[in-house]
Image (spheres, rainbow, N blue to C red):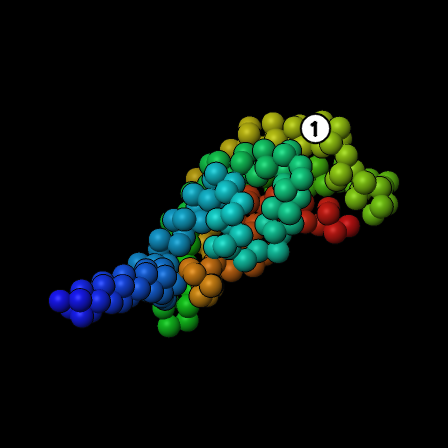
């Protein structure tokens, strides 16, 4: 009787471990369903500016810069939310063999706003002065609140931008790799402009 009880417990534990392992490996398998689910998760995380999810599901040097800045400055979180609140991402096709997904992306057109902001911010300032400004909450309150307000008024174009993004297996899930073309499409041009400003 005691032997059968022990055997039963072992079987239950083994079954539970199998389910756990299947859940972990299932989320990171390169299936069409998982790729589509990953895209949906990234779209929602961008719209919510969910830093934890973005850090796990997206590789993007420019987005990482914004995420790092937002750790200590809430103004960058507010900027991130308004940048992506109108984002729309549609999966056009999945190529499991080449580990890519082709996306149709629509967001506000922020390129002109970003260009003017970058020009004003960098005009006559050294790298040291710019870095100091990025840690000056008074400046960020004024400057980024103005930028945020301008972005909220920007319109979304009728036609989407088509991009192809590579997909890789992360530790526990699939990860989308955003190159500069993807960053521009997803952000409406603003991420690259901010990156250029920060690394000026």
Image: 99 above or below 159 = below
Q: For residue 151, which quarter of the picture?
A: top right
In the image, residue 74 lies at what x, y percent?
Answer: 63, 34
Up the image or down, 94 lies above or below 135; here it is below
Question: Whole-percent x and y of residue 93?
Answer: 35, 59
* Residue at the far bottom in the pictured view: 97
Residue at 73% over, 46% down: 197
Query: Visible in this render: residue 186?
Result: no
Q: Which residue corresponds to the image point at 22% horizontal and 67% vertical from the top-left? A: 6
Of 35 and 121, the residue lying toward us: 35
Q: Quadrant of the N terminus?
A: bottom left
Q: Which x, y percent locates residue 114?
A: 65, 40
Tell me: residue 188, above or below residue 143.
Answer: below
**For the residue carrying disc 1, how many other residues have a C-alpha within 10 Å: few (<14), some (14-19), or many (20+)?**
some
Q: Is residue 199 above or below residue 12?
A: above
SS at mark 1?
A: helix
- The residue depicted at 84 percent of the width and 41 percent of the height is 129
Mark 1, residue position: 141
């Amino acid at each position: 009787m005691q032997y059968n009880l022990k055997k039963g417990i072992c079987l239950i534990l083994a079954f539970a471990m199998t389910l756990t392992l299947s859940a972990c490996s299932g989320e990171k398998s390169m299936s069409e369903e998982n790729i589509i689910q990953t895209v949906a998760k990234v779209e929602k995380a961008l719209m919510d500016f969910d830093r934890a999810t973005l850090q796990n599901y997206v590789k993007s040097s420019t987005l990482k810069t914004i995420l790092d800045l937002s750790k200590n400055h809430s103004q960058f979180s507010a900027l991130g939310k308004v940048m992506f609140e109108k984002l729309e991402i549609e999966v056009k096709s999945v190529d499991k063999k080449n580990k890519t997904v082709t996306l149709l992306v629509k967001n506000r057109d922020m390129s002109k706003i970003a260009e003017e902001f970058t020009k004003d911010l960098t005009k006559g300032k050294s790298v040291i002065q710019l870095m100091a400004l990025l840690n000056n909450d008074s400046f960020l309150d004024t400057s980024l609140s103005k930028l945020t307000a301008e972005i909220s008024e920007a319109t979304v174009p009728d036609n989407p931008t088509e991009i192809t993004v590579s997909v890789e297996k992360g530790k526990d899930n699939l990860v989308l790799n955003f190159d500069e073309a993807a960053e521009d499409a997803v952000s409406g041009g603003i991420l690259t402009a901010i990156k250029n400003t920060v690394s000026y």
